[in-house]
């Protein structure tokens, strides 16, 4: 049987004349941090102080001594970042130039010092650029010339920390006769029967050539098994699982997973084995044309879905630090916010298997980008061969996961070619189109025909339409954040909104950790350094000013209002687009997470703390949603039911005065079929007068609430908010308290910023609006004993102007 030796110990990193202890997997930055050579680049302005790291060569060394009776020994790297020259005992082993694929080298009988020397990514990119010529890029960094995580060169939410190192596991594999080189399980379902077509490729030693071997496969817990004799280098095994339990996205059913095992054996017993978990489900992408344009609807197990999605970026700009536990924490946060789709964005990485394993278990559908983003990419060598090898590696690695539902060719490059001035600058040079419309769809069709592929995001489906045409395919909505009020999200109904978002700063405790000792202000040095978007603060301020007076010299108020506007903006878009299902078939918010502490579009900040937006996602992505949509003829009530059960809603509409006086009450009985939406005009008597600064509308049903204010907050006649606060201990839990807030007036967007009570404190609720006489109970964990005075200092709401 094949033996494996993990090479995690005994590594050193050369730094000048010194040898520093190195951790593998890891990277240069983490090793230099551990040795005290560099400061934490996430703190203050330190990012600029460590820029030199990415411009140097670095060498890792370890002593390699092994004694094996096997015929063959392979040195296997799951990930090298990025351009590396490898020697063993002073003799060459191989070279690499791609962070996103694995490498295997025959080192049979060889021992001595193993040396992995990494060139500067900038030097490698320059060498490639000298061969291919210039290509345009949104950012002034050379990410398109090297197959490396693009956002390590910086992004409009990320730092420039250009990594190098052995970032994924490395091992020795000792084997004889033959080994399993590749397994492609094509998993389908037909008439209730699960089918697995296992396509198995072998590699043989010289002695193993021509020997008949036996390959077998079984699905644990079932009677499905198959066996075949292998005389060449490959075989196909077919298994059937009667009455297979279907894997469903979360909210639509369960996520049963089956263990698939493949064993290769010779005359003397097993030689190698391969094990993964699979799930039975069908997935299709409906891109049919209709009276509204060209659709883009995911269909899982025959059920058409409105995708409730978020975009995912690397959870750390030093990705080797992201553990399986961290993946599970972040993805569990997503599932608990009623998210059912995670798009792995093309400027990051193909994530670790632990990411996809967790998505399988939680029922989170994965939209996987191939790794191209916001740049024109040369299609010449040496890049073309690397792109093909990388795509083949990762399609095969990821295809067992039932959570993976879509392959996507690139992020914004087809759009960029049309609108960002690339075409004249390219003057006929290649820019990636051949990848997205040729190479990648061919690879997916060859290796993983069970899943749909789309050429890009955004993409209208063909050059017959503009790539970002909202009526055709996927759409990225960025004009609103860049130039408009968030109310403009309601001006159109795209077929599928694959990116849109609004910025806000991170939690206060995150800022205090990242900017120690700084007097916080929107334009303080650290705040500006941790704001990477072009005119980011200007856009934040304009977003606030459209609704509230911009606070002067009151950072706490500015911080609260920017976070509230972010939550409201994203909610406004989702509520509008969900109300127009099935024309609009999904929203993918930019973005779920951050890779460091920064003002960004994220719902969860760089320290893992949820922003108010996170709690709003949980509300607007719930199976059932009430919303009031403004319109020229008055507000419309939309009752959204994404569950599999019908919803009979008794909706109470109340027109109220700002001072709490009830002006009108009406009850509407609404029957909503499963996965359907009902839109009704609000009766004339219940609707506030257009432009009224003294009336608003409340809709309630089954514990859900929607609000409609006819004018911006700065023009509304809010009373001075008055409320009582009490703190109640939670029996048996010294680390938890219940905060009870009782309103005497209208209290709009009441928010408890729990991290102000302690860095580890969390609250179970986000912003909420209380009417006079209402109360709310907020569970706070991790804050210790607190009194009402402490809590009041952490409570914010919309104040009277």
Image: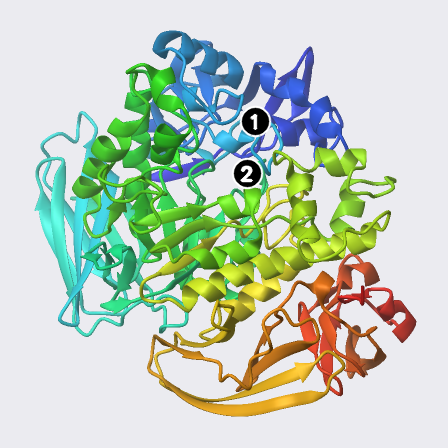
**Residue at figure coordinates x 9%, y 40% from the top left:** 212
Q: Is residue 781 above or below residue 509?
A: below
Where is residue 751 shown, x and y percent of the image?
Answer: 73, 67
**Residue at figure coordinates x 76%, y 64% from the top left:** 754
State how the image is colored. rainbow
Instruction: For residue 328, say whether it is visible.
Output: no
Q: What element carries label 1?
A: loop
Q: How crowded is mark 2: few (under 14 residues within 10 Å), some or many (20 or more)?
A: many
Where is residue 349 shown, x and y percent of the image?
Answer: 45, 38
Distance from the alpha carbon under mark 2 to that under mark 1: 9 Å
Q: Any mark on residue 238, and which?
A: none
Question: Is 795 left, or right, of 599 in this rendering?
Answer: right
Where is residue 408 shown, x and y percent of the image?
Answer: 32, 43
Dot 2 or dot 1, earlier in sequence: 1
Nearer the observer, 801 or 412: 801
Q: Is residue 74 above or below residue 673?
A: above
Where is residue 595 shown, x and y percent of the image?
Answer: 60, 42
Question: Is 97 left, or right, of 259 in this rendering?
Answer: right
Mark 2 in CB contact with mark 1 (< 8 angstroms): yes
Instruction: For residue 366, say whether it is visible.
Output: yes
Question: Is 483 left, or right, of 454 in this rendering?
Answer: right
Q: Is residue 318 above or below residue 64?
A: below
Nearer the observer, 267 or 160: 160
> Image quadrant of residue 457?
top left
Q: What element carries label 2?
A: helix
Question: Is 186 left, or right, of 706 in this rendering?
Answer: left
Q: Name the residue under label 1.
A: 163
> Image quadrant of residue 598?
top right
Q: Name the residue under label 2.
A: 319
Which image quarter is the C terminus in? bottom right
**Residue at figure coordinates x 82%, y 64% from the top left:** 794
């Amino acid at each position: 049987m094949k033996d494996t030796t993990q090479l995690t110990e005994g590594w050193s990193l050369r730094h000048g004349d010194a040898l520093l202890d190195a951790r593998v997997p890891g990277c240069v930055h983490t090793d230099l941090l551990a040795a005290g050579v560099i400061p934490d680049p996430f703190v203050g302005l330190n990012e600029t102080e460590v820029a030199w790291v990415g411009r140097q060569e670095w060498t890792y060394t370890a002593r390699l001594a092994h004694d094996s009776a096997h015929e063959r020994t392979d040195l296997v790297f799951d990930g090298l970042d990025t351009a590396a020259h490898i020697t063993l005992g002073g003799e060459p082993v191989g070279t690499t130039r791609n962070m996103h694929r694995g490498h295997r080298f025959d080192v049979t009988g060889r021992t001595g010092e193993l040396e992995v020397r990494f060139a500067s990514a900038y030097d490698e990119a320059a060498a490639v650029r000298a061969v291919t010529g210039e290509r345009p890029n949104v950012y002034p960094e050379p990410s398109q010339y090297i197959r490396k995580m693009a956002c390590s060169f910086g992004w409009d939410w990320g730092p420039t920390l250009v990594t190098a190192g052995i970032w994924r596991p490395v091992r020795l594999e000792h084997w004889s006769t033959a080994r399993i080189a590749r397994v492609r399980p094509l998993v389908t379902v037909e008439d209730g029967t699960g089918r697995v077509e296992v396509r198995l490729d072998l590699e043989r030693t010289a002695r193993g050539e021509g020997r008949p071997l036996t390959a077998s496969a079984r699905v644990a817990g079932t009677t499905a098994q198959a066996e075949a004799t292998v005389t060449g280098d490959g075989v196909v095994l077919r298994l059937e699982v009667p009455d297979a339990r279907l894997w469903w996205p979360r909210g639509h059913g369960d996520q049963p997973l089956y263990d698939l095992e493949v064993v290769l054996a010779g005359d003397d017993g097993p030689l190698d084995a391969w094990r993964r978990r699979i799930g039975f489900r069908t997935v299709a992408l409906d891109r049919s044309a209709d009276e509204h344009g060209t659709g883009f609807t995911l269909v899982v197990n025959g059920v058409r879905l409105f995708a409730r999605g978020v975009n995912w970026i690397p959870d750390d700009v030093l990705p080797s630090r992201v553990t399986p536990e961290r993946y599970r924490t972040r993805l569990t946060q997503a599932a608990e916010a009623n998210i059912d789709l995670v798009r792995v964005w093309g400027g990051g990485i193909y994530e670790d298997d632990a990411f996809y394993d967790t998505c399988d278990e939680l029922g989170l559908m994965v939209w996987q980008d191939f790794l191209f983003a916001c740049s024109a990419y040369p299609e010449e060598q040496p890049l073309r061969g690397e792109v093909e090898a990388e795509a083949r590696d990762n399609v095969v690695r990821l295809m067992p996961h039932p959570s993976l539902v879509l392959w996507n060719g690139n992020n914004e490059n087809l759009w960029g070619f049309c609108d960002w001035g690339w075409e004249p600058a390219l003057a006929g040079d290649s820019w990636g189109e051949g990848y997205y419309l040729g190479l990648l769809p061919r690879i997916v069709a060859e290796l993983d025909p069970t899943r749909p592929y789309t050429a890009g995001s955004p993409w209208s489906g063909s050059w017959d339409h503009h790539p970002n045409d909202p009526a055709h395919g996927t759409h990225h909505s960025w004009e609103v954040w860049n130039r408009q009020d968030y109310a403009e999200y309601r001006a159109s109904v795209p077929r599928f909104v694959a990116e849109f978002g609004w910025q806000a700063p991170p939690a206060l405790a995150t800022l205090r950790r990242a900017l120690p000792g700084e007097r916080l202000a929107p334009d303080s040095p650290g705040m500006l350094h941790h704001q990477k978007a072009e005119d980011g603060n200007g856009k934040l301020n304009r977003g606030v000013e459209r609704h509230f007076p911009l606070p002067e010299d009151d950072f706490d108020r500015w911080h609260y209002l920017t976070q509230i506007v972010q939550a409201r903006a994203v909610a406004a878009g989702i509520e509008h687009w969900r109300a127009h299902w099935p024309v609009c078939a999904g929203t993918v918010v930019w973005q779920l997470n951050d890779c460091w502490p920064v003002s960004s579009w994220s719902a969860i900040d760089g320290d893992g703390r949820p922003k108010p937006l996170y709690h709003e996602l949980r509300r607007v992505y719930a199976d059932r949603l009430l919303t009031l949509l403004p319109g020229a003829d008055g507000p419309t009530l939309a009752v959204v039911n994404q569950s599999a059960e019908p919803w009979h809603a008794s909706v109470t509409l109340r027109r109220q005065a700002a001072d709490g006086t009830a002006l009108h009450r009406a009850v509407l009985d609404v029957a909503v079929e499963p996965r359907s939406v009902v839109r009704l005009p609000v009766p004339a008597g219940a609707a506030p007068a257009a432009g009224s600064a003294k009336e608003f509308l409340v809709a309630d049903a089954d514990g859900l609430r929607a609000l409609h204010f006819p004018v911006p907050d700065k023009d509304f006649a809010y009373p001075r908010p008055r409320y009582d606060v009490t703190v109640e201990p939670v029996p048996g839990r010294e680390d938890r308290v219940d905060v009870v807030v009782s309103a005497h007036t209208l209290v709009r967007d009441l928010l408890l910023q729990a991290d102000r009570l302690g860095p580890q404190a969390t609250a179970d609720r986000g912003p909420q609006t209380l009417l006079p006489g209402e109360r709310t109970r907020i569970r706070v964990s991790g804050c210790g004993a607190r009194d009402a005075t402490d809590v009041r200092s952490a409570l914010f709401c919309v104040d009277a102007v």
